[in-house]
Amino acid sequence: MTPEKWFGVVSLFPDMFAPFTQQGVIGRAVKSGKLSVDTFNPRDFTHDRHRTVDDRPYGGGPGMLMMVKPLTDAIHAAKSIGGENSKVIYLSPQGKPLDQAGVQRLANIDRTILICGRYEGIDERVIERHVDEEVSIGDYVLSGGELPAMVLMDAVARLVPGVLGHKASAVEDSFTDGLLDCPHYTRPEVLDGQKVPEVLLSGDHEKIRQWRLMQSLVRTKQRRPDLLNHLALTEEQQRLLDQYQALLRQ
Ligand SMILES: Nc1nonc1C(=O)N[C@H]1C[C@@H]1c1ccc(S(N)(=O)=O)cc1
């Protein structure tokens, strides 16, 4: 069965992806055929005795880059499996910051190749020739692009129909409507003297829905006001936020 979504990962450390593709939500998605992850190791495309995969930067300076030929051979091998139209993404600090909108956009692409940088990165000409998008998971420099690749695949896989199953839904996740998620509670009803908010025990689903929305709005305003600046609040959201702010002024 053709998987709904295929990722081809170009990485010098393919073994890092085994636990990721065998456990949890992603493991179930792979087992059910909704997701498929193939790895392509540039080291498998070396021909010298030392299986060299790094190379010195022109112009000198510290650090190494990924050697071009093994890398581009691995990219071609990935394209031979995913197809020439596969979307090629390079994970790097220079990339566009990954957010939920970007995740949702990537969730609509069936064949994606992820290039995981190592060392100081890759030759700019490889980016120009093969990379469709550079994506960053945050403003910090990691030792490899493998963890960013797993972050991206996990966030995208959660949006693949059927991956989360009926018990959990990406719909109520943070950022799905652009807001942070509301607080959650489970047993016991009293934990270290702290009770679960009464409304959650009321069984009144409309009241619970409004309470949760209010909590999301307040949490977003308090913790990430920047997110609110980019949102067109619905009439209900604005009313609830106004109610909260009126309460604060009392
Ligand atoms: N943050 C990140 N989001 O996605 N990838 C991230 C990351 O740190 N990848 C690092 C291993 C690779 C890398 C790539 C490019 C550069 S460089 N020379 O361009 O600065 C430095 C390090």
Image (cartoon, rainbow, N blue to C red):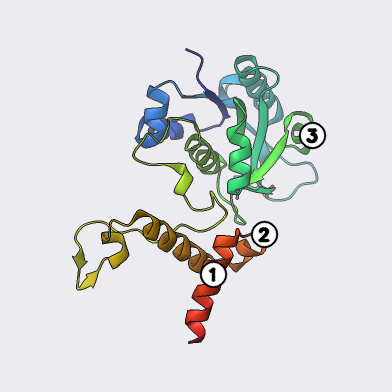
Height in image: 44 above or below 213? above
Give coordinates of residue 73: x percent, y percent.
67, 21
Q: Earlier in the sequence, mark 1 or mark 2?
A: 2
Which structural element holds mark 2? Answer: loop
Q: What amino acid type is highlighted by mark number 2?
A: His
Say if mark 2 contacts mark 3, CB within 8 Å.
Answer: no
The residue that disc 3 covers is 128
Which structural element holds mark 3? Answer: helix
Q: How dense is the environment of label 1, judged by Cα within 10 Å: few (below 14), some, or many (20 and up)? A: many
Give coordinates of residue 200: x percent, y percent.
30, 60
Q: Residue at x 75, y 35 (%)?
A: 127
Q: Residue at x 55, y 47 (%)?
A: 143
Which structural element holds mark 1? Answer: helix
Q: Nearer the viewer, mark 1 or mark 3?
A: 1
Q: Residue at x 50, y 37 (%)?
A: 159
Q: CA distance from mark 1 to mark 3?
A: 46 Å
Residue 211 visible in the picture:
yes
Q: CA distance from mark 2 to mark 3?
A: 31 Å
Q: What amino acid type is highlighted by mark number 1?
A: Leu
Q: Earlier in the sequence, mark 1 or mark 3?
A: 3
The residue that disc 1 covers is 241
Give coordinates of residue 205: x percent, y percent.
35, 54
Say if mark 1 contacts mark 3, CB within 8 Å.
Answer: no
Q: CA distance from mark 1 to mark 2?
A: 16 Å
The residue that disc 2 covers is 230
Q: How dense is the environment of label 2, judged by Cα within 10 Å: few (below 14), some, or many (20 and up)? A: few
Q: Nearer the viewer, residue 60 or 183?
A: 183
Quadrant in the picture for residue 112:
top right
